[in-house]
Amino acid sequence: MQQAERYNPAESEPRWQKVWEERNAFRAEDGSRKKKAYVLVEFPYPSGDGLHVGHVRSFTAIDAVARLLRMQGRNVLYPMGWDAFGLPTENYALKTGVHPRIATDTNIANFKRQMQSLGLSFDWSREFDTTDPKYYRWTQWIFLQLFKQGLAYQAEIPINWCPQDKIGLANEEVVAGKCERCGTPVTRQRQKQWMLKITAYADRLLQDLDTVDYPERIKTQQVNWIGKSEGAEIEFGISNQESGSTEGRRALGVGRRRYVLLHGFRGNAKRIFFPWLRKKLEATGAEVIAPDLPDSNHPTEEEQVGYVLKNIAFDENTVLFGHSLGTVVALKVLERLQKPIAGTVLAAGFTTATFKDKPRPFQTTFSWDFHWTQIKKNAGFVKVLRATEDVAVPAAATRALAQKLGVEMVDGEPKKTHFTGSREPAILDALVPSIRVFTTRPDTLFGATYLVLSPEHPLIANRELRITNEGEVRAYVDQAARKSDLERTDLAKEKTGVELQGVKAVNPVNGEAIPIWVADYVLSTYGTGAIMAVPGHDERDYAFAKKFGLEIREVVKPKRGRRALGVGPSEELGAYVGDGMMVNSGGYDGLDNHQAGQKIVAKLKREGKGQPAVQYKLRDWVFSRQHYWGEPIPIIHCPEHG
């Protein structure tokens, strides 16, 4: 028997590959009446190293499927392309000194040669490249559709920051806490980034896991990644902001808070919510100035802005509030101040003279050009409120105002349209800071003996809290910025933190004033960036309380065992995290803890201090991570006008 001839791929495969190419053997037929099949494999990043075995494994398996479908008479669309935009290409260019365009084209040619030599049956007539304007124009189109629906937005978030290169870094660019490019220690810094609101689809992502044929292990990973938690959001008020003597506050470098309230067109300080708001703010111990602006029925910029600047003093303790046309007056005042104030709150505001219902006479007596750089320099912290279903101001106008000031617009529920009720709690909430927490254990609220804020919490970053040890807090925040999230949440690490002196939080169920701390084990990327600490029923809170000598209070007791006999939290027993009967919880004592939790949330909802809520571990996607080589985001910002 004659020995079979040894197979020589270098001889036979190029010949057949040429035949396939000449005959367009793998091209999908436009307009064909054959049954269609769409076969797709993840298109690769064309690195300088060429294909690796992982590519070949995936491509070979899917190629067999495409060939089988063709043999079964299907019209198969099986395209291939190149994911050539983004950080990997940029980093490769920096490493080699070759421009990304040149490196991309060279690497694509090599990848394509390797794929064709393997005999993969891609339809090369439909080849695409993410760096091609003909391709990424559709990426931009999709982005704009998301933007129009509020699913693409800008937000300030903590990112990895290289102080040497002055750029944000992806996690893979941080090696041992240092920048991969230059070796400089990396810090965490809040930067404005474009985000895609994937959290809007969290429930749908969970529900649709039932429709896919995934192994149970993979489904479980997906469920844990999305991380749905049901509980309640609860508001803790802040007290003692103005406590102590004037001399004592001055010695600590903390002045008395001053609120300046500016009314709108045809208004005065005695109309709509202004008397109610003045009373509420004065109850906090603050000074309130609410002038009647001149000629409110026929206002002019020169007269009203000039009156405010002439008659009212502004300093670092001042919070400026404007309502409706008062927001325009406030912005014009900020343009002309010589030094920054504490903060600015604008409600039902606008920066263009276009209204939903009718024209106003001030459209021609005010200038609609704004010096945004100067305004932002002087504004301090900024909050922009839109009245839902506003009959006068378009939502787009208030949203544009927020974008120009670099903040997110907040939708507030008015008591009367355009925030014209005799009381408007949404405005008070914006002016007087409070701390919102998410908890899955509202039944333990009576056991909350302190609050903890993340180092990145806006109340700290914006200096809204009237703390007397700001230097100590800032030093701790800077220290936390040099740690990764994994380092901060390591259960084995020693707990660290600093109390915010001069302020207390008010527990909404019992009125107790409790300490506020900043600690790095709380992350800004989960929940609200603040937690109510219940050391009697949470192990992390227990360890923190033991270290810093904070009160540990048991409010849920098991129905049997040593604790049921009266043994509270101790070094031996630690925190109790199970279910049981309510104790030390006022009128809820003796109830099952689940039943009590529902009653507590219902009461808080009636009082406007809390509500049922759902949170997810899933975070919105940072879309603007590339520095140079990436899809151009189709939004243009003017440095001066926003």
Image (cartoon, rainbow, N blue to C red):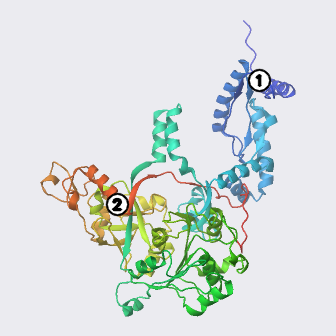
Q: Within the image, what quadrant is residue 329 found in? A: bottom right
- Whole-Å distance between the Cαs marked 2 and 1? 79 Å
Looking at the rendered structure, the secondary structure element under dot 2 is helix
| Sequence-first disc among 2 and 1 | 1
Q: Quadrant of the N terminus?
A: top right
Q: Nearer the viewer, residue 585 or 501?
A: 585
**Residue type at tag 1:** Asn
- The answer to whether residue 510 is above or below residue 61 is below
In this rendering, would 16 be left or right of 66? right
The answer to whether residue 521 is seen in the rendering is: no
260 in relation to 385, above or below: below
Residue 87, image x and y in percent? 67, 55
Look at label 2 and name its amino acid. Answer: Leu
Q: Residue tagged by mark 2?
A: 604
Q: Residues within 10 Å of mark 2 (few under 14, many from 20)?
A: some
Q: Is residue 53 visible?
A: yes
Front residue of 434 and 209 = 434
Q: Position of residue 216 (x, y in %)?
A: 46, 34
**Residue designated by label 1:** 8
Q: Nearer the viewer, mark 2 or mark 1?
A: 2
Q: Residues within 10 Å of mark 1 (few under 14, many from 20)?
A: few
Residue found at x 80% / y 35%: 124
Report the side of 169 relative to 477 (left or right).
Answer: right
* Residue 560: x %, y % from top left: 15, 48
